[in-house]
Image (cartoon, rainbow, N blue to C red):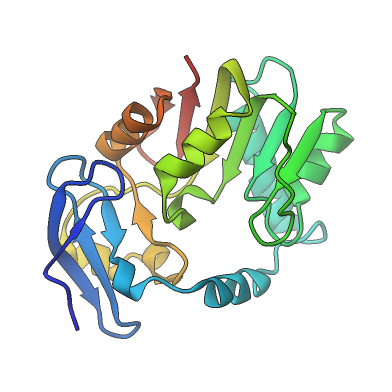
Amino acid sequence: MMEESGNCPLCSSRSDHFYHNSKQNRNFYLCPDCSLIFQGRASLPDELEEKARYELHHNSGGDQGYISWLERFISEGMDPWYSGGAVLDFGSGPRPVLTDMLKRKGLDVCSYDKYFSPTWPEGRTFSCILLSEVLEHLVDPLSEFRKIASLSETGAKIILQSAFLQNYDKKCFGSWWYKEDVTHIRFYSASSLQMLGLKSGWNLEYQDGRSLAVFRKP
């Protein structure tokens, strides 16, 4: 049954129903205050479904296309903002390819993933936290950003890539390939990224309107 409204996971504003994906029976809501589009809780995948979907990912160190994509993230996303120190690859997936690539560059890197590397690096602190195609999966992004903050130095950076919303036309959203992954449940724009930082204690330093954002811990 379709819920007519839902509470925004960023700012808690009551949000009206925006789009129904009949093929997947998924309902999406648009926050009137921070413009986040989010999937309703009633249709979220459970943990078994979520993990099974991640295990279908074929991203590996032998996939040259994937390697090239990560190299661009490192050179265009990470390098301009990284000034040294320990790195956390947050949401590293079943095969921590990004972690391995950075280790080969001589960096001190630790990987964490809810399902595949679940040991939280207690007692460590990080100056750089990477979220490569992770933000759109987070059910409770505020809780996760606060959790990251507990391990982060003052001035630490969160550098993330995702696919950001370009407009709020229902027809465009309906045909957007990025929403078809059932584990992609939150979709951000400049205003929702700003709200994420405000509510979680991080300053939004940069976002390019397409796929890259950088937050700094004050």
Instruction: Reply above or below: 158 against 2.
Output: above
Query: Picture quarter containing residue 53?
Result: bottom right
Instruction: Reply above or below: 189 against 153.
Output: below
Instruction: Reply above or below: 79 against 175.
Output: above
The mark tally for this picture is 0
**37 or 15: nearer the eye?**
15
Q: Is residue 175 left or right of residue 100?
A: left
**163 or 217: nearer the eye?**
217
Q: Position of residue 76 (x, y in %)?
A: 59, 31
Q: Residue furthest front?
A: 123
Q: Position of residue 174 (x, y in %)?
A: 25, 70
**122 or 36: nearer the eye?**
122
Residue found at x 53% / y 50%: 134
Q: Quadrant of the N terminus?
A: bottom left
Residue found at x 39% / y 70%: 44
Residue found at x 33% / y 31%: 199
Query: Picture quarter containing residue 114?
Result: bottom right
Q: Position of residue 108 (x, y in %)?
A: 82, 29
Q: Is residue 73 left or right of residue 135?
A: right
Q: Position of residue 177 (x, y in %)?
A: 39, 67
Residue found at x 44% / y 72%: 182
Q: Is residue 6 left or right of residue 151?
A: left
